[in-house]
Amino acid sequence: MGSLFNALHTSIDAGAVILIAAMGSLLAERSGMLNLGMEGMMALGAVAAVVAAGQLTSPLLCLLVGIAAGALCGLVFGVVTAVIRANQVLTGLALVLLGVGLANRIGTDFAGTPMSTTFSSWPIPLLHEIPYIGRALFSHDPIVYVAYLVLPAAASYVLFRTRHGLNVRAIGENAAAADAAGLRVTATRTIYATIGGALAGMAGGWLVLSLTPTWTQNVTGGRGWVAIALVIFAYWRPWRVVGGALLFGGMISLGFLAQDQNWGIPAPVLAMLPYVLTLVLIVLPAFVPSIRARRAGAAPAGLTLPFYREAR
Amino acid sequence: MIRLQRRLRVDRRRSITLRLAGVVISLLVAGVVLQISGSPALMLGRRAVETMTTPYGMEQGLVLATPILLTALAVALGFRMRLWNIGVDGQLYIGALAATGIGLNVNGPTWLMLTLMMVAGAAGGAFWILGPALARAYGRVNEIITTLLMNFVALQVVNWLSLGPWRDSTIPDLSATRRIPYELPILPGTNTVPIGVIAPFLIAAVVFFIFRFTTWGYEVDISGGNARAAEYAGIDVRRRIVSVMCISGAIAGASGAILVAGTTHRLSSTISNQYGFSGFIVAALAAGAIVVLILVGLLVAGLLVAAITLQTLGLSVDAVLALYGLILIGNVVAEVAARYRVVRTTKPPPELQFAPAEALAGAGPQGLSALTAAGSPPESTD
């Protein structure tokens, strides 16, 4: 029984990384910016936090450094694709190579050394004392609560309950119409690309400041790609991303559980489960007619399309 | 006042010049970064050129060029239909795995076994992309993400077999399979280059022939240019998507088979030195021109050799990966720059601010396509 709730605890933590990154991708995509470079921005955010941890003692400050690194990459993406209007897919893939390569290069010197500062758990008073459930749900570090409660609530509120959010979605659906209505397409897209990068950097930073508190080469291990996939799975709805992230986290913790309990499944097979699950999550719905019909048109219509005022 | 004005036509020479400039600027930026971070960039460059020009360096370059060129061809084939096969590394691994499986478990004359290994490699690569291909064709699932995620699965499958059932337990600390008893012969005239090096040139010639002279190639080109028009003309675009992606996967898989049969002789999860991403960047820089693809591929292979040889001086495969990213960004920006010209005006003429719809209509199909594609690797069209 206890190990099951431990597994739940792990799922929530492992899902949080994906959740933060996916929320960043979702916000950027809603404005029409598909940044495939999440993996690279996460890696740079992580390595920035690792480097910062050598100088700073507060994990929050280290996280801020990671966020800043991610935001810088997001800004570069925004400028290159929204202002200069270069191909989003190629630019995103370039960011993956640049980010992962640079992060691994910088991280070489830090590989294997444990982080000197990490987030510690903030048990919620009273609630965390509930037997079993209490530890599993209410005994995480502060960023996890932010990831599961603040981020989706804020993203959902801004996107669907404010005029600004309506504008952002309009820009993502039809930039030319939004422009004709007087909205600032380029500025909004650049800002949202930066926000997406900041959240990717935050995900990477938190990864090394809490989940796996040491730098290892390729520490992000495809999580950036999973985040992009989860946005598709969630059909661009913030709260549904939470569900996807928990499923992904569940798969990771299932791997730990299987090793812990000696179920006799080879470790590599367990390690591939989260990716297989992610693939199933995005492929299967496309072949179930009812889901497919419900999701038709969910993707922002202007995703990856550059906006040329002078061409329309 | 200086303004930017869009060109209706992009001429090829200007585009190439600007893209070359983009690459040079990226290299300069990388040099400055290296210099600041404490590695002597100039000396590094000189040593890199030295490494690339020694007989050993050139042979190593050819050895590395084999998987890079093959994966680049695989990616470029996808580009013909605006499909992104980012999972070439995974297909390479599964191809290598299939070839290793045959090589370790079947006995026969060497020539037959090597042929079987190549066929198994190609089949393994095609099999690995079949899922993403079917999902893309019949479910419109974005192939960039599915092919890429399959890389991680492939790596774990290789880990499982090379650390588990197929592991060579006679040598301690070796996390690879037993040595495959069949080896590709060495190319005559060289000391270390396996005969597999001719594969990319053969395949490039075949691909060129197919797209120049066959109906199938023409139909693929049409489907890539305008899927709706192709469907209207009676082409089964979905089947073309599946077959193009499977052939792309097969080429990548064959490169894995050549890699284990010619170079590594054992399967492990580290046989690829980022060959997949190297192939991707070669294909992206070549933008569909097959001769350019081969030239760029050889250059990138030389760069990778230099990076591996000069690890102590601050270069590494990771540094090269970062450099790829930088070059690719320089390239996409240059591609956009080629589409604009700088004009001096005293006052912005109002009629130019809004779109020259008449001008567009007059420009004909070429003018329109220049606005959207401009010879670049394609946007994902979904």
Image: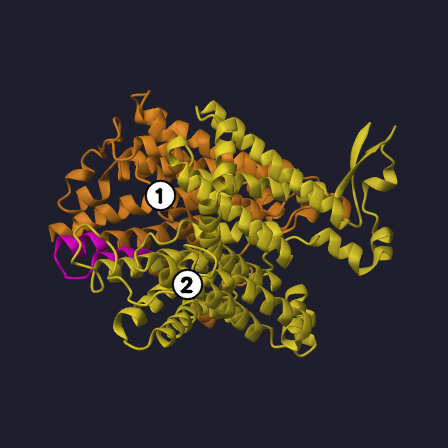
As helix, strand or loop, the secondary structure at mark 1 comes to loop
Display colour for chain A: orange
Residue A168 sits above or below residue A273 on the image: above
Q: Report the amino acid beneath label 2.
A: Ile
Q: Which mark is residue A168?
A: none
Residue B338 location in percent, x, y? 73, 43
Q: Give the range drawn in magenta.
A: A255-275
Horizontal and vertical percent position of residue A182: 70, 39
Which quadrant would residue B236 be assigned to in this image?
bottom right
Q: Main secondary structure of the magenta part?
A: helix
Query: Residue at position x 42%, y 53% from top?
Result: A230
Going by the image, does B345 lie left or right of A190?
right
Which chain is depicted yellow?
A: B
Q: How crowded is mark 2: few (under 14 residues within 10 Å), some or many (20 or more)?
A: many
Q: In which quarter of the image is the N terminus of chain B?
A: top right
> Relative to residue A49, is residue A101 depicted above or below?
below
Question: Residue at horizontal 56%, vertical 48%?
Answer: A90
Question: Mark 2 falls on what kind of element?
Answer: helix
In the image, residue B262 above or below residue A183:
below
Which chain's residue wears label 1? Answer: A
Q: Within the magenta stretch, is there residue A212?
A: no
> What residue is shown with label 2?
B258
Tell which of A111 and B342 is nearer to you.
A111
Single out the residue that lies furthest toward the front.
B189
Q: Please give the residue where the numbered disc 1 appears in the rendered image.
A: A218
Q: Where is residue A246 in the image (x, y as percent from the top left)?
A: 31, 51
Crowd around label 1: few <14 · some 14–19 · many ≥20 (10 Å): some
Between the C-alphas of marks 2 and 1, the distance is 27 Å
Q: Nearer the viewer, residue B124 or A290?
A: B124
Q: Label 2: chain?
A: B
